[in-house]
Image (cartoon, grey):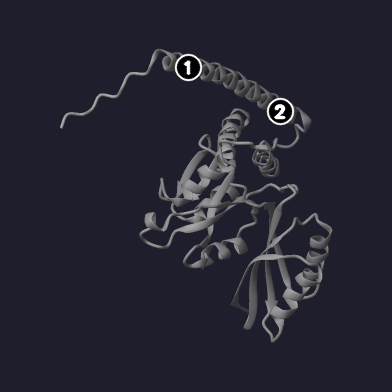
Amino acid sequence: MADQIPDAPSASDETELRALRDQIDAIDQQLQTLINQRASCAQQVAEVKQRFNQALPAVFYRPEREAQVLRRVMERNTGPLPDQAMARLFREVMSVCLALEQPLSVAYPGPEGGYAEQAVRKHFGLSVRGAAMTDAEQALKAVEQGHCHYAVTPIESAHEGLVSHTLDLFRRYDLRICGEVELLLDPADDKTLAADTRYLVLGKQYVEPSGHDKTSILLSVKDQPGVLHDVLGAFRQRDISLTRLESRTVHQGGDAYSLFYIDFEGHQEDAPVMDLLSELDRGPDTLKVLGSYPRAVL
């Protein structure tokens, strides 16, 4: 059976289509002009930052600022584009503008094209320079030695829970958590059922409050009955909500210790969190604040 030839649009339809396409072309031109204006502003921001404190390297990537911008984009969005789609568009605009200020290099455990690189692109956009490393430790080492600005490494797997190797690296490297990335994976695309779904961004900078933050800590406490109850009580007394709690036993000098990895809501500059950290840091317990950072937006 021969293919049917679609009816040609009527003259009035063709006129309407031409008018709509002309309108789209005009809007595209306006968008292009505005994007370039935004890029020029970003370049001016870079110049001001470099003049502001010439004794120290300028910090161009501000995780809390980007999170605030993306949240506002979603809050004011009126459609028809979904909030997440609109935010992803702005994510890329910010990515190319940041590349004009300072091209970022981000290390991640390989391979290229894997889930870790997807997490890098989702968080930083397509204009970032990704650097695949043999493993998570090499990624953190690249940041510590100044070869890369940031590292993105897995912290949670949907099917295996906490990535324990990353926890060991947190104890050994003095880097701060600057952000988190959540990957929503289709089980049909994940034949191994071992894909990592939450990643952390690590760097050297302190991140200011964004308004919707998390804090992560490592707490080492001598193993004894009731230790978990005591730790949880400190959070409960201040009405601080936990988002993740993992514990395991480690041995040091012949003694057993409970090592807690805890994520909770709030920033370390918030008064209740400051009070909590002060209490946890007293006595023989060992506290390491891994960082406060914006909650994942996309």
Q: Is residue 268 above or below residue 19?
A: below
The kind of residue on which mark 1 rests is Glu
Q: Dot 2: within a 10 Å radius of its alpha carbon, few (fewer than 14), some, or many (20 or more) residues?
A: some
Q: Is residue 294 above or below residue 79?
A: below
Residue at left 47%, top 47%? 117
Q: Quadrant of residue 68?
A: top right
In depth, the one of 166 and 265 nearer the eye is 265
In the image, is 270 to the left or to the right of 7? Answer: right
* Residue 226, x across and y down, in percent: 71, 84
Which structural element holds mark 1? Answer: helix
Where is mark 1, residue-wise? Answer: 16
Query: Mark 2 or mark 1, which has the lower sequence index?
Result: 1
The kind of residue on which mark 2 rests is Val
In the image, is 224 to the left or to the right of 135? Answer: right
Q: Dot 1: within a 10 Å radius of its alpha carbon, few (fewer than 14), some, or many (20 or more) residues?
A: few
* Residue 135, x across and y down, in percent: 46, 55
Single out the mark in the foreground, 2 or 1.
Answer: 1
Where is mark 2, residue-wise? Answer: 45
* Residue 194, x across and y down, in percent: 42, 62
